[in-house]
């Protein structure tokens, strides 16, 4: 829900035809169906994100862009845009000329995200945030912080939430992620800004009359769960170290700063097609043996000591891994099965994400690591 509030914030700051500048890996841009454009007619102008969640703020003098049209170097304006338009915040702002030229949209909002989800739960360097905000303010823009996990950033950086957002005009905070409330987010800013957000929330159908019970949960999260976020971070780092040792898992555990662990699967080592090929081969061999009377029929095994017949491994894995799954989805499904219910998210192809929170305990971390080993063995390319 925090991005719902970031959507409200952007719409409260900007008018139709204006732009939000943000990193190209930020949640506001990557997800939510481009809601600010779809619903409010506000454009995105993205700058490529670095691994730590930052993006370049300035370009060098050697890269200085011409003011308009062809420059002295003979490079056209469109070529400059291709070369520099996605490289720095400075160029993203200057390329629009503040909206003074009627051909260009006006940059109205700089949106930041702390911690940064897709960059692995990284904490934005505070000096960088301050410099980015100063550049945006100098251009007459507002600065909004998507703080879905802002308290995680505060705990990891040993800095107060107030200091983290002191240079921002507005901030949103999710109560239902690390803080543990069942639902809910809040947005903060000036009284005029909040009044605009309330009107926008109404038109989006986001009002709720009986909100007290949810607000109470949010208060508990703010007062109590924030005190133990460091435990989530420690468990995430322990999980990352364990996952990094799993054959076929690609993960630099040193990059994990907060409660988010992203990792990749080596396609040369792990592939769902290898599992399907083995299952098909085993099924064919079992069927042939049954037909020849030289082995048990498929689906039958000798009883266990307690009298219960175990499920055939090939049938069990076929049920866990559907034909529609890619390798990351299959890994997540197998891990959940082998760990006894630990869930992680797949991000398509070979990328996955695990997130720790107050309901994740030390034994859950161990179960996840054990499940990852067994999932990797099932998907191993021979």
Image: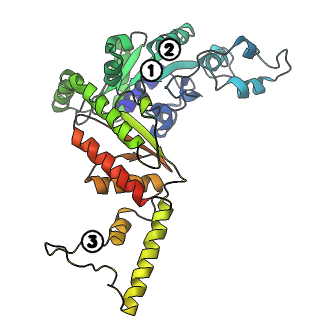
Task: Indicate which disc residue 128 carries.
Answer: 2
Q: Residue at x 56, y 29 (%)?
A: 43
Please determine whether, in this image, residue 60 is positioned above or below residue 288.
Answer: above
Task: Indicate which disc residue 317 carries.
Answer: none
Quadrant the N terminus occupies = top left
Q: Residue at x 46, y 24 (%)?
A: 10
> Residue 363 at what x, y percent from top left?
22, 43
Element type where label 2 sits in the image: helix
Please determine whether, in this image, residue 373 is positioned above or below residue 225.
Answer: below
> Residue 361 at what x, y percent from top left?
22, 38
Tag in front: 1 or 3: 3
* Residue 322, quarter of the rendered image: bottom left
Q: Are marks 1 and 2 in contact (CB under 8 Å)?
A: yes
Q: Residue at x 77, y 23 (%)?
A: 77
Please determine whether, in this image, residue 375 is positioned above or below residue 119.
Answer: below
Q: Which residue is mark 3?
A: 311
């Amino acid at each position: 829900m925090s991005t719902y509030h970031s959507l409200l914030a952007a719409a409260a700051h900007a008018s139709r035809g204006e732009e939000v500048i943000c990193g190209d890996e930020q949640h506001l841009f990557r997800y939510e169906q481009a809601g600010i454009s779809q619903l409010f007619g506000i454009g995105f102008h993205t700058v490529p994100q670095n691994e730590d969640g930052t993006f370049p703020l300035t370009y060098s003098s050697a890269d200085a862009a011409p003011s308009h049209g062809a420059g002295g170097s003979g490079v056209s304006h469109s070529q400059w845009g291709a070369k520099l338009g996605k490289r720095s915040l400075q160029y993203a702002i200057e390329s629009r000329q503040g909206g003074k030229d009627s051909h260009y949209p006006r940059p109205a909002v700089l949106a930041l995200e702390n911690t940064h989800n897709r960059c692995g739960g990284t904490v934005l360097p505070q000096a960088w945030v301050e410099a980015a905000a100063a550049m945006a303010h100098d251009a007459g823009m507002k600065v909004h912080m998507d703080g879905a996990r802002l308290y995680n950033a505060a705990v990891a950086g040993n800095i107060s939430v107030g200091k983290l957002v002191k240079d921002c005009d507005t901030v949103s905070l999710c109560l239902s992620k690390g803080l543990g409330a069942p639902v809910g987010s809040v947005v903060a800013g000036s009284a005029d800004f909040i009044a605009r957000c309330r009107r926008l929330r109404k038109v989006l159908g986001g009002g709720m009359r009986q909100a007290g019970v949810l607000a109470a949960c949010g208060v508990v999260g703010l007062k109590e769960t924030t005190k133990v976020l460091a435990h989530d971070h420690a468990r995430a780092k322990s999980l990352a170290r364990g996952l990094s040792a799993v054959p076929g898992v690609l993960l630099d555990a040193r990059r994990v700063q907060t409660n988010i662990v992203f990792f990749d699967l080596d396609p040369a080592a792990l592939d769902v097609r290898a599992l399907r090929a083995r299952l098909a081969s085993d099924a064919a061999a079992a069927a042939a043996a049954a037909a020849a009377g030289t082995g048990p029929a498929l689906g039958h095994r000798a009883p266990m000591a307690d009298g219960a017949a175990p499920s055939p491994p090939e049938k069990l894995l076929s049920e866990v891994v559907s034909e529609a799954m890619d390798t990351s989805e299959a890994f997540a499904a197998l891990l959940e099965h082998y760990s006894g219910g630990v869930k992680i998210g797949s991000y398509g192809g070979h990328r996955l994400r695990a997130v720790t929170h107050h309901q994740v305990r030390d034994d859950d971390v161990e179960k996840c690591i054990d499940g990852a080993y067994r999932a990797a063995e099932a998907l191993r390319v021979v």
